[in-house]
Amino acid sequence: MKLASFDGGRIGLVNGDDIIDITGEVNVTPGAWPPVGMLHVIERFPSLKARLAALAENAPRKPLERVHLETPIAWPNKVIAFPANYHAHVEEMKRGTGLISPFKADGQGFFLKANSSLSGPAEPIVLPNIPERQIHHECELAVIIGKGGRQITREQALEHVFGYACLIDVVVRGKEERVMRKSYDTFCPVGPWIVTADEVPDHTAIDLRLTVNGELRQQASTRDLIVDIPEMIRMASAVMTLHPGDIIASGTPAGVGPITGGDKVVIEIAHVGSMTLDVIQGENGGHPVWDKSRTQPDPASVSTP
């Protein structure tokens, strides 16, 4: 099943090239603040699933091209991200920094990314006006938590996965704190919908790729992860309670690179979907914190997912 947010917080089921509006069926109020409608759907999904499956067969629908798709989860409790989580990307970092052994995800853990950086498949990535800095794309799988919990074991972890989505983690390269460099508005596109876990045949072999202007930049599979999906859930829940709708960003494979205004970025994930995003140069976002020059490689900046 594919669940989407569209047209100002409405909830829909995606069926082929069409969408079925289920907003009323799931008792969500479009435009409500905070925008937590999808969180309630995820939390109640076990009791809603049979009714939604029936709607998918019989309810009226409209073409996807006639609606405005939004990020499927606009207000999660948290966005959790795992840095340096592919071996090839770690090797890439070594070449970029001259470091012999930068920390990997299994040794340095995770960080949080601001919810306000979330954007949807129909929104551009807006670059801040900091011309002295490179801004990079990072292709990632979003793991959506369905059942919350704390101290979740590896053996139980997949029971807590609601589904998956495409995610691009955008980052300003530099020495500043990682959360600041990764939390500009539009720096976390997620979508185009959530695919429930039962539609993904093998979580250990999900292929993902990213192109910029038609050039292949990143290509990998979840089989290459250092910290796999069950261990991400185990690690995160050892520290904090996970809630329905929490987003875990899996980390990025090798091939991260710069994006500039006018670029077109495409992310594709097998069994999940794809997003095509325009990159535009914004006028805002400058601050003296970005003005200091870089005089040496920054292991923190190149080790982020």
Image (cartoon, rainbow, N blue to C red):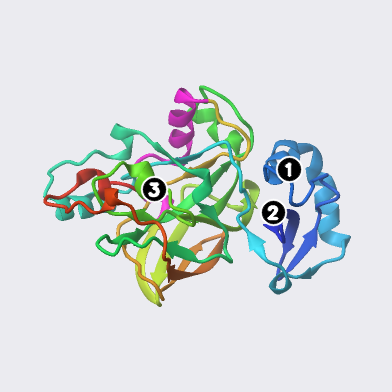
3D distance between C-alphas at marks 1 and 3: 26 Å
Single out the residue that lies furthest toward the front.
Answer: 288
Q: Is mark 1 on a helix, strand or loop?
A: helix
Name the N-terminal-most of marks 1 and 2.
2
Residue appearing at x 81%, y 50% in the figure: 52
Q: Residue at x 57, y 57 (%)?
A: 191
Q: Which of 13 and 173 is in front in this view?
A: 173
Q: Main secondary structure of the magenta part?
A: helix
Q: Is residue 185 magenta?
A: no
Which picture quadrant has residue 168? bottom left
Q: How many residues crowd mark 1 within 10 Å: few (<14), some (14–19), many (20+)? A: many
Mark 3 highlights which residue?
A: 251
- Which amino acid, mark 1? Val
Question: Mark 2 = which residue?
Answer: 3
Q: Residues within 10 Å of mark 2 (few under 14, many from 20)?
A: many
Asked whether 222 falls inside the magenta stretch, the response is yes
From the image, tell me which residue sits under label 1.
41
Task: Write down the region rendered in magenta.
Answer: 221-240
Q: Earlier in the sequence, mark 2 or mark 3?
A: 2
